[in-house]
Amino acid sequence: MILHPAVLALLSGSLLTGFILVCALLFSIRILVRWDITSGSEYQLTLERRTYLIATILNYAFAFQIFSLFLYIYTADHLHGLFTGAMCAAGSLHVNSYGYPVLLLKIVNLIFAGTWLILNYADVRGYDYPLIRPKYGLLLFLVPFVLVETVLQFLYFGNLHADVITSCCGSLFSLERSGIAADIAGLPFRPAMFAFYGAVCVTVLCGLYFCRKGRGGYLYSLFSALTFVVAIASLISFICLYFYDLPSHHCPFCILQKEYRYVGYLLYGTMLGGGVAGIGVGVLMPFRGQGSMARIIPGLQRRLAAGSIFLYIVLTIIVSWRIWVSPLELN
C-alpha cells in the first residue's frame, strides 16, 4: 500500500462512514418494524429522540461520501507520477482491476447519498415524520453499496505497487482500442453535440414548466438524469477536446489538472449537482400530498428544480464559451 495523506484520509473516512452506516442500518430495522407515530409508548418516544441523532450523524457521513468522490479522483491523479506510463488519474486507476469499479460505485453512491439527504431534509421539517420509513428503507438499499465500495477501495490502494507499468490515458481512450471508453470517444461529433445541447434544452424547458405549474415532476427528473448521462458521454466524446485543443485526446481526467485550471472539477460538480437535484424532484413526488409534506415538498421541489436548471445552464455556458474561444475545429 502507498501511504499518502489523501489515501489515509480516504481509507479512515470510509471506515468511519461504514461503521456509522452499519449502526444506522440496525436502527433503521427497528424503525421499519416498530415505528408507530400514533403510539405514546416509551419505546416510540425513544425512537423519536434517537432518529434526530441518527439523522444528524448520517448527514455528516453522507456529506463525506459525496466529498470522497472528488478526493478519490484527486488522489488518483496525484499518484500518477509513481507509475510508469501513467499521465493522469486514468493511468492510476488502471494499475489494478479495482480502480475503475470503485470510481463507478462512488458515483452511484453519491447519487444515492444526495437522494437520502434530500429525503431527510424534507422529513425533519414535518411534524408527523411522514418520510421516516422511505428514508430508512433507502438506507437499507444504500448501505451494501457503500460497504462494497469500502472493501474495493481498500483492495485498490492495498494493491498499488510503484513498479507496475500501466497504460496512459491516450491509450485507454484511444479510438483504436475496444471497450466502452473507446466507443464513447468514437461517437460522431455533430450528433454528440446535438444530443448534449438538445438534452439540456429539453431539461431546462421541463424544469421551467414544473417550477411554474407544479406538474411534470417525474418527467423532469427523468430528463435530468438523462442529461447527466449525456453530459458525461459528451465530455469524453467532444467537450474535452476543446479544452485540450487536440482532436484526439479524449481523456476525462487530464482536465482536472492544474494546467487546465482544474476546470474539470467545476464541470463534474455541475453535472452531478444538476443530476442529483433533478432526481430529487422525482423522488419527492409520491410524498407531496402526505400530511405535513403538502406544505413543504412543493416549495422544496421548486428549489431543487431551479438549482438543477441553474447548474445545467452553468455547465452549458462553460462548454459553449470554451468551444467559442478554442482554435480547434472539428468536422
Image (cartoon, helix red, strand yellow):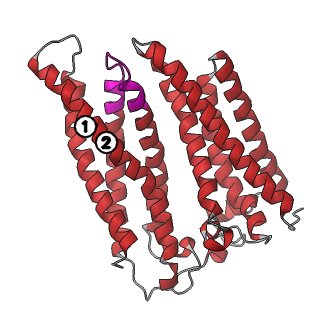
Mark 1 burial class by Cα count in 10 Å: few <14, some 14-19, many 20+: some
Decide which of 186, 314 is in the foreground and name it: 314
Q: Can residue 105 be seen in this view?
A: no
- Residue 54 has which mark? 1
- Determine the secondary structure under disc 1: helix
In the shown orientation, is residue 261 left or right of residue 132?
A: right
Q: Residue at x 64, y 54 (%)?
A: 267
Q: Residue at x 52, y 25 (%)?
A: 300
Decide which of 311, 246 is in the foreground and name it: 311
Q: What residue type is labelled 2?
A: Leu
Q: Name the residue under label 2.
A: 58
Q: What residue type is labelled 1?
A: Ile
Magenta residue span: 119-137
Measure the alpha-carbon separation of dots 1 and 2: 6 Å
Q: Quadrant of residue 256?
A: bottom right
Mark 2 burial class by Cα count in 10 Å: few <14, some 14-19, many 20+: many
Location of residue 47 with respect to 138 vertically, above or below:
above
The picture places residue 261, in percent across and down from the top left corner, at 65, 67
Q: Residue at x 70, y 67 (%)?
A: 250
